[in-house]
Amino acid sequence: MEGVIDADTRDLLSADGALDWCVTEFVRVVDAKLPPRVFLRHCPELATASTRGPLTPSGAPVTLQLLGSDPAALTANAEQAIALGATRLDINFGCPAKLVNRHDGGASLLRTPARVKTVVAAVVAAAAPHGVAVNAKLRLGFDDRRVALACALAAEAGGAKELVVHARTRRDGYRPPAHWEWVARIRAAVSVPVVVNGDIWTLEEYWKACTLSGCRDVMLGRGMLADPWLARRIRHWQLSGERLAATPWSARSEILCHYAARKRERGMPEKVVVSLLKQWLNHMRARDAEAAERFRLLRRETSLAAFLEGLSAPRPEATDSLPA
Ligand SMILES: Cc1cc2nc3c(=O)[nH]c(=O)nc-3n(C[C@H](O)[C@H](O)[C@H](O)COP(=O)(O)O)c2cc1C
């Protein structure tokens, strides 16, 4: 997730071994072959890639995501990524950002399914000779869902080995609900595996998304930031049929403190660390009353030491209600 999930976050969120794989932020391809440093910035795990490709320290494979629309540039950059050690590539057809869409990237390609096929085929042309699998990350369409099946079929025809479907159109943005039942239609139309994504914040939503889509696998986005135990919670239920206890505040604050320590070790200025912590806490407060209360108390804090103190201080007067 652009601006949110970097190598440190991937490391922290995958440390318990509950995630099958992670994805980088997108590498934006325009018309040139990008230098290795761009790939290494997005995917520092490439620097220590093994024959299994780039891995998080706990061993979760890292998929490198490309975003673009120029077939020749995508082929050249896919080759570059593979030469650097990437063994899994993903193509972004979901980004709703106006700037990206104006430049013909992300979700804008969904307006013309034939272009989805061309773009996937361009990456597959570079990847297939090396045995590298290419995935496509789709939304249900740009303005409406009527193109959902055509786009999924186009991605498959281009050679995608797996589809991850964020169950909304670009027009839907991030507004609930996610239309998981539409992912079932896609599953019925294609032969490759389909992973359902969108609005899975809890174990219950995991069940519902799987039931309505028929998918076995889910991709977790904001829910993983909101509840760092979400993947572990799902895995625990899969293995034991039991529910894990609610994630304690201490687990949330601990991951935030580790994240801050990492960023400081890397020389990131305190102010930037504080703003990144606020961004993460903002995701946490979506579904947790205590995080909401801490966010309220710390939203104007600028000192890193005071912010960290506020995270680990004894429980504040929590309100019972969640933010609207
Ligand atoms: C801040 C932010 C950045 C994102 N960046 C990316 C990205 O770089 N690539 C991508 O495929 N999806 C990106 N997404 C979309 C998510 O991967 C996911 O599809 C979407 O948030 C819905 O899933 P969720 O409800 O579990 O978050 C981003 C979402 C957010 C909120």
Image (cartoon, grey):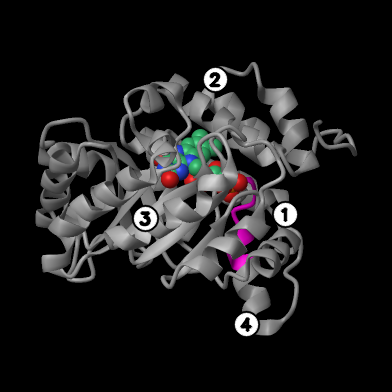
Label 4 sits on residue: 239
Disc 3 or 1, which lies upstream in sequence?
3
On screen, residue 72 versus residue 93, left or right, reads: left
* Cβ atoms under marks 2 and 4 closer than 8 Å: no
Q: What stretch is highlighted in magenta?
A: 226-233
- The local secondary structure at tag 3 comes to helix
Label 3 sits on residue: 154
Rounded to the nearest angstrom, the CA distance separating label 2 from label 4 is 43 Å
Q: Which residue lies furthest to the right in this view?
A: 320
Label 1 sits on residue: 248
Q: The residue under label 1 is which amino acid type?
A: Pro
Rounded to the nearest angstrom, the CA distance separating label 1 from label 2 is 25 Å
Q: The residue under label 4 is which amino acid type?
A: Leu
Disc 4 or 3, which lies upstream in sequence?
3
- The local secondary structure at tag 2 comes to loop
Rounded to the nearest angstrom, the CA distance separating label 1 from label 4 is 21 Å
Q: Residue furthest bottom?
A: 240
Q: Quick check: 49 above or below 65?
A: below
* Cβ atoms under marks 1 and 2 closer than 8 Å: no
